Image (spheres, helix red, strand yellow):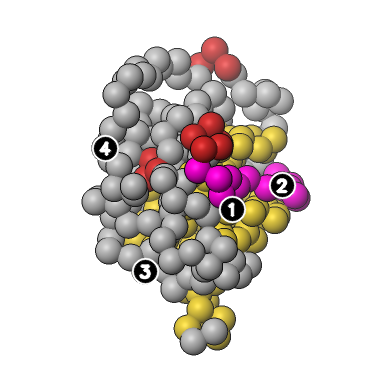
Amino acid sequence: MQRLIVVGLACAHPNHSHRPSIREALDILNAKFYPWDKASGNLTDFHAPLSFSIDSHNNKVFGDGLAFFLAPVQFPAAREAGGGLGLARENHTSKWPFLAIEFDSFSNSWDPPSKHVGIDINSVISNATSAWLSSIEDGRKIYASIKYDSILKSLRVTFTGYISNQKIEQRLDYHVDLRDFLPEWVTVGFSVATGETFEKHVLYSLYFTSSLQTNDKPATPPIDNAPRINIPTDSTPPDRSNK
């Protein structure tokens, strides 16, 4: 499967009074594929180069970040702003399985003590992280590559960093078998969130390819087989570090 996806803009409003209704946004793109085939047990390779920016408009305090994810085709928005990144209830495990690569601009209590890139499985408590030498105050464009090797079962994320205004390439690697937690059908999406501070997220482009070819698979996901889980709504919002 090959797909060029050009996507638009998601941002937090600089006026605090307008922010609660738009402080998280989850966009499930029109790209669904099989990460693995149950009949053969084969995994797919996939590659997702993307470009985006996170801009605090020169503010020194900002949050919370952006995430690329793979999840079941009926994956709901968790409606959790701040550190939950719109994917899960902050530091709780999601009832829906997902794989996410987070570009996290705010350090919550469960995070490393700096801006970072993380690989998340079913929770925003990252399984692996790398400090991110970002340039968020002036909103420089970030180029990233998310690549999965099905033979090595290796997920590699490369991403732009900056040292003394010089662009560098950073890297994060993690060994993971997607068959352990993802269903056969998944969708590709992005989620962004802010807490009580401002930052603007712009997603410029994504090019997504995967290698697994299955001629006997249905043309659309088998919706009846997708999980249906009611996520309870707590009327009292959880305490957030980003305030």
Which residue is found at the position 48% from the left and 70% from the top? 134
For the residues labelled 1 and 3, the Cα–Cα distance comes to: 19 Å
Badge 2 is on which residue?
8
Badge 4 is on which residue?
239
Label whose residue precedes the other's in the sequence (4 or 3): 3
For the residues labelled 1 and 2, the Cα–Cα distance comes to: 10 Å
Give the number of the mark in front: 2 or 4. 4
For the residues labelled 4 and 1, the Cα–Cα distance comes to: 24 Å
Q: Do the residues labelled 4 and 1 touch (CB within 8 Å)?
A: no
* Residue 81 among magenta residues: no
Check disc 2 and give the amino acid type.
Gly
Q: In this view, does 3 lie to the left or right of 62?
A: right
**Residue 14 shows which numbered tag?**
none
Q: Indicate the secondary structure of the residue bearing disc 3.
A: strand
The image quarter containing residue 141 is bottom right
Q: Is residue 134 above or below residue 202?
A: below
